Image: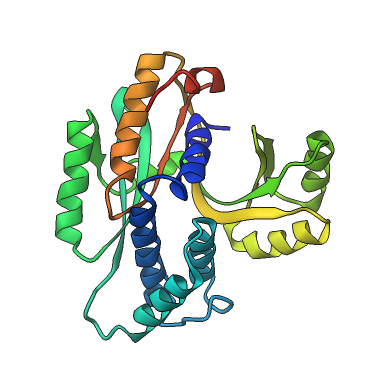
Amino acid sequence: MSGHSKWATIKHQKESKDASRGQAFTKVSNLISTAVKSGGGVSDPEKNFKLRLAVEKARSLNMPKGNIERAIKRAAGQKGEVDWTEILFEGYGPLGVALMVEVTTDNKNRATAEIKNLFERGGGKISAPGAVAFQFKKSGLMTIEKTNNPQEQVLKLMDVGVDDVEEVTDVIEVYTDPGKLREMRDKIESQGFKVLSEELIMKPLNEIKIEDVNKAQQILKFINNLESHNDVQKVYSNFDIPEEILKKTNV
């Protein structure tokens, strides 16, 4: 389990509670707009997989139902007023950690300049497309509610036919083929497991272990600055910060 995955879990738990709640709503609204556009204008989450994931993301942030419905209607009714674009930036951050940054923007030139600036200010550098992507694997990720017998859960989940299962502090993470995410969710739920969330991710194939608190804080500050950008949806990295080190950081 990568340190970044642990950190992402902490960030996710905070999103619905802290001052960034409004920004989180704006980001997920943009994600909904892009999902509708890339799905050919289909505004039914049951018929548009990316939109279903975006709506579930909104719900996980406790975004009001009315806000979600308005975002979908607004996206479906757009006639070219806003041209949402998805961009995937690749690069390297402090200590050579590899990064994949998913962006949803209505201004590609502005977003490119600002993301490049964030990389450079943080001691990183944007790379050409394909220069970093080979270090990651597209995967479907589900988080499962942990019971008082997680070892038994892990064994049962492996029997379902998923790619990998990892027990973490508060939940169990299940990785599967991205094209089989919905199929696997149905199978897992039919076995009595409670799926808390699902998403498509970029999972690092190899990780860089960071065991120094100061270096860990440098990396987490860099990731924080990227994630705080209004257009950034997700940041994936290959750093691995042990939990005991992660707990000592104050980022």
Colour scheme used in the picture?
Answer: rainbow
Nearer the observer, 88 or 122: 122
In this rendering, position of residue 229 left or right of residue 45: left
Residue 25: image quadrant is bottom left
Q: From the viewer's perspective, is residue 69 above or below residue 88?
A: below
In this rendering, position of residue 189 left or right of residue 251: right
- Screen quadrant of the C terminus: top left
Q: From the viewer's perspective, is residue 69 above or below residue 184?
A: below
In this rendering, position of residue 222 left or right of residue 7: left
Nearer the observer, 83 or 238: 83
Can residue 224 be spotted in the picture?
yes
- Screen quadrant of the N terminus: top right
Residue displayed at 50% across by 50% down:
201
Residue displayed at 53% across by 40% down:
9
Looking at the image, how many numbered discs can be counted on the residues? Answer: 0
Residue 108: image quadrant is bottom left
Measured as percent of width and height from the top left, residue 47 is found at 56, 79
Can residue 203 be spotted in the picture?
no
Measured as percent of width and height from the top left, residue 73 is found at 40, 82
Measured as percent of width and height from the top left, residue 196 is found at 64, 53
Residue displayed at 59% across by 77% down:
46
